[in-house]
Amino acid sequence: MKKSVHLFIRSLVIILIVPLVACTLKKGQPIAGPEIVVPTGNPVSPAEGSVTQTEEAITPSQEPVVFENPEAGTTMLWKDINYVVYIPAGEFVMGKDETETSNHNPAHPITLDGYWIQQTEVTNAMYALCVSLDVCTPPTHETGKPNWYTDPKYANAPVVGVDWSQAGAYCEWIDARLPTEAEWEKAARGTEGPPYPWGEAEPTCNLLNFKDCLATPAPEIIRTYPLGASPYNLADMAGNVFEWVFDRFASDYYSTSPSGNPTGPSTGEERVVRGSSYLTPAEDLGIFLRTSLKPELERSDLGFRCVLTGEAIAKPPTAPVCTLLPFNLIEKESQWPNLPADSAPAVNLQTYCKLDNQNDQYGTATITLEQGSDPGPIHISSPQGSLTCNQDPNDPLKFNCSGSALQPGKEVTISVCNVPLVQQAINPTCPVFYQFNPVTNLCQYGVPIPVMCAAPDVVIFGYGCLPAPQNGECPIGSYSALYDNKPVCVPAGGPKCQGQLCPAACPAGLVFNEGNFCCDYPTDVKPTCPPGHTYDDVMKICLPDNPIQASCTNIITTVQTCPPPVICTSFSTESGCKSNPLCKWNTYAAMAGGYCTNK
């Protein structure tokens, strides 16, 4: 079985979310015509998915709705569960004028078409899903650096150690590409051209992750520095990790660059790298700075993000993934600071014999931990049978045990183990449009494909049935706009089908399930887990690939036997009877005699 790997993100969506498939009305069906209220922006060009209709499909009562481009900074979920942000078409100033010659001067105006760019760098969890499906290849681990890719704590930190081709392959998997250098810089600086994404203020460690901000230098979890966001609300455009872009590198390219949608020089051995990293000193954080690297190389502080083009958003929608792991359904590795996991507990064992109401013998035991021990992870068992041990209410280091394993006169092995417990996190939650199934511990796609428009779906001519946002979220490939003063989720690329269900596709590596109209994992790929973990089919949970083993102290002893029962009738005198604590003397009321009985 393949290993599957995932995210958990710190408080953000980290599991695949895919779009609902909108139905369309039959040709000629009349609809009401409320006023359309949409974000302001430039009209959608055909290349960016404009709404077009045949002349025969338009009647005076059915004018097609043409949604304009979303406004700047509008966010939309995409196939890898990362948000993309809309950067509107228009002009900005790229580079910086300086008296000395540099590879980032002169400053020059550039005009770009509108585009969508990922709000954050691609994370270890996102990249790991692509690897688990054999679409992407694993990143390179740099010798002497921690392997953040396989550490669950860094599941939502940017993936590093990928070369230019690996980054491009991931972007292609989600129907995207690497941004051009111009697209990257506009998203980072906006149109005003400040030196940093947040503006003119000098860099500080509450704005970004750069040199000496962390005690141990490392990529930080995405969206950790909201105060350092760019004018379009993109995260980590400075600091954290450098980023690959599409263009080849030439130090003098700015002096010959075309003014519209530049894609870099046609030749060159190196590719442009933009931004800065957790190792960059403060004087090198200017967002206009450029560097480069041979495309076959990688670095431990270099990642990437992707851009969507008009061609990408105009493709048929992706069908939903049928089942996903919940956000929080994953083991917690318990920490016991007073008792290292690799040391067996030091204990004292004492067995006892007792008599029940029928004078039958049974065994008990008392297990005492040494002073300073932590009783939390202690697990006690025996191969000879059941063993129930309860903590003494007056002494937390003492356990009182009973069970079938403790047979008077027989040998018993008792294992006292320091066990690193595995616990499921409470309150598992699912992405929008999914419901948690407590039987399978999985999130299941829970919204049926609409065959007719039913509330809260909205009928819009040219689009069919558009869903309303759920918890403020729209399906992948859609953004929120207003129709008749009500929010609806508008496909970014315009209507994708007319008169029939849209032909849906699955991301590479997943298999389309016609019965449920969703995408299944292949039989040898399980729902994704954090790096270094594997999905367990029986427990329905992600478990560590190399779990910490229990450390045990095994004690072999013989359970004590009870002394022979006392026959109290053998005591003929009162003093002899009372000399045994198990006996009592009963005196006749009418005479001086008496008899001895058991208490």
Image (cartoon, rainbow, N blue to C red):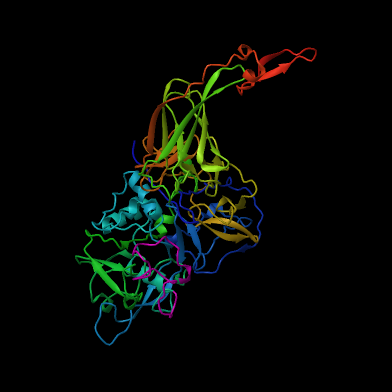
Could you say which is closer to the camera, residue 156 or residue 290? 156
Q: Can residue 174 be seen in this view?
A: no
Q: How many labels, in total?
A: 0
The quarter of the rendered structure image containing the N terminus is: top left
* Magenta segment: 198-227
Q: Residue at x 20, y 66 (%)?
A: 267
Residue drawn at the location 29% of the way across and 75% of the way down: 257
Q: Can residue 502 be seen in this view?
A: yes
Q: Quadrant of the C terminus?
A: top right
- Residue 577 at x, y percent in the picture: 63, 18
Residue 183 magenta-highlighted: no
Residue 124 placed where, x, y %? 37, 54
Can you name the residue that lies furthest to the right here?
590
Is 43 situated left or right of 31 in this image?
left
Query: Quarter-wise, where is residue 107 in the image?
Result: bottom left
Q: Main secondary structure of the magenta part?
A: loop
Q: Is residue 220 part of the magenta span, yes or no? A: yes
Q: In this view, does 583 lie to the left or right of 337?
A: right
- The image quarter in which residue 436 lies: top right
Single out the residue that lies furthest toward the bottom: 99
Looking at this view, is 468 or 484 the one in front?
Answer: 468
Q: Where does residue 103 sit, x and y in percent of width and height?
A: 26, 77
Residue 432 to residue 442: above or below: below
Q: Could you tell me residue 538's position as x and y percent?
A: 44, 33
Q: With 213 as the anchor, is 70 left or right in this view?
A: right
